[in-house]
Image (spheres, rainbow, N blue to C red):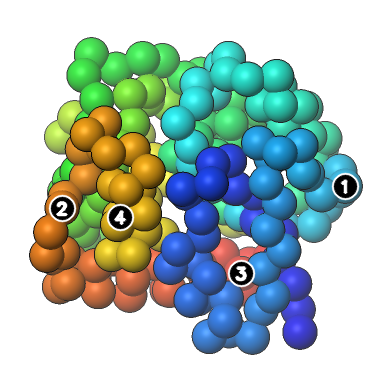
Amino acid sequence: MPALNLIQHHPAEGPGAIALWAASRGLTLNVFRADLGQLPPVGAAPVIVLGGPYESNAGPIWLEAERQWMAGCLAQDAAVFAICLGAQLLALSLGGHVRRMEQPETGWTAVTFTDGQTLKVLEWHEDAIDLPPDALLLASSEQCRQQMYRVGPRRIGLQFHPEWNADSVAVLNQHFADESPLPRGTQDSVAHAAVFEWLLGTLDAWWAAV
């Protein structure tokens, strides 16, 4: 089976719906825990980079190792699909900036794509991206303009979390307890289904470009 590397930063933030996509496409996900010092070799292999509750500009020592690793992979023309913290790390590596927002953006949020499509997605972030040179903005929300961007056909950054399904939300709520701003109780199955359908199409397009 073809394999795809995935970088995870926190025990409560796993691949979620991405694992379902990979299984349905006959792909094996090789999961590396960057917070445990695990990273694949620097190279041109395509990679998905998840989010996590850390500052992309600072954070723990292992995050600096990941920043250097990502810069090395990009120098070898690696394809990257990056989410939240991952999208911020990608932007920094490509010459963009990350700044603190006036207030966090959390919970179900409407994002509007440049083709006019609107999608309700889950958010939990305090920082926003100033896009790197040559980046194409693909989606925005009312509170945060830089919700999705692309640099070339094979590097995509998302500020929102399409990989968070109902199971993901339950794990996050259990781990972060009162700190979590995510919905509790009965989940919005219609919204989750719409996000999953969007994720499937978006990952298929990225993987085809890879």
Seen in the picture, residue 98 relative to 173 is either above or below; the reply is above
Q: Which residue is mark 1?
A: 41
Q: Which residue is mark 3?
A: 207
Circles 4 and 3: CB distance less than 8 Å? no
Report whether residue 124 is seen.
yes
Image side of residue 162 versus residue 36, left or right:
left
- Pick the front one: 133 or 76: 76
What whole-number distance in Å separates the C-alpha atoms at marks 1 and 2? 39 Å
Image side of residue 70 versus residue 132, left or right:
right
Residue at (48% x, 76% y) in the render: 20
Q: Which residue is mark 4?
A: 169
Find residue 92 and name its label: none
Amino acid at circle 3: Trp
* Nearest-to-viewer mark from 1 and 4: 4
**Label 4 crowd (10 A; few <14 / some 14-19 / many >=20):** many
Q: Which residue is mark 2?
A: 184
Label located before the other in sequence (1 or 2) = 1
Circles 1 and 4: CB distance less than 8 Å? no
Label located before the other in sequence (2 or 3) = 2
What whole-number distance in Å separates the C-alpha atoms at marks 4 and 2? 8 Å
Image side of residue 67 versus residue 41, left or right:
left
What whole-number distance in Å separates the C-alpha atoms at marks 3 and 1? 20 Å
Circle 3: element type: helix
Amino acid at circle 4: Val
Circle 4: element type: helix
Label located before the other in sequence (4 or 3) = 4
* Nearest-to-viewer mark from 1 and 2: 2
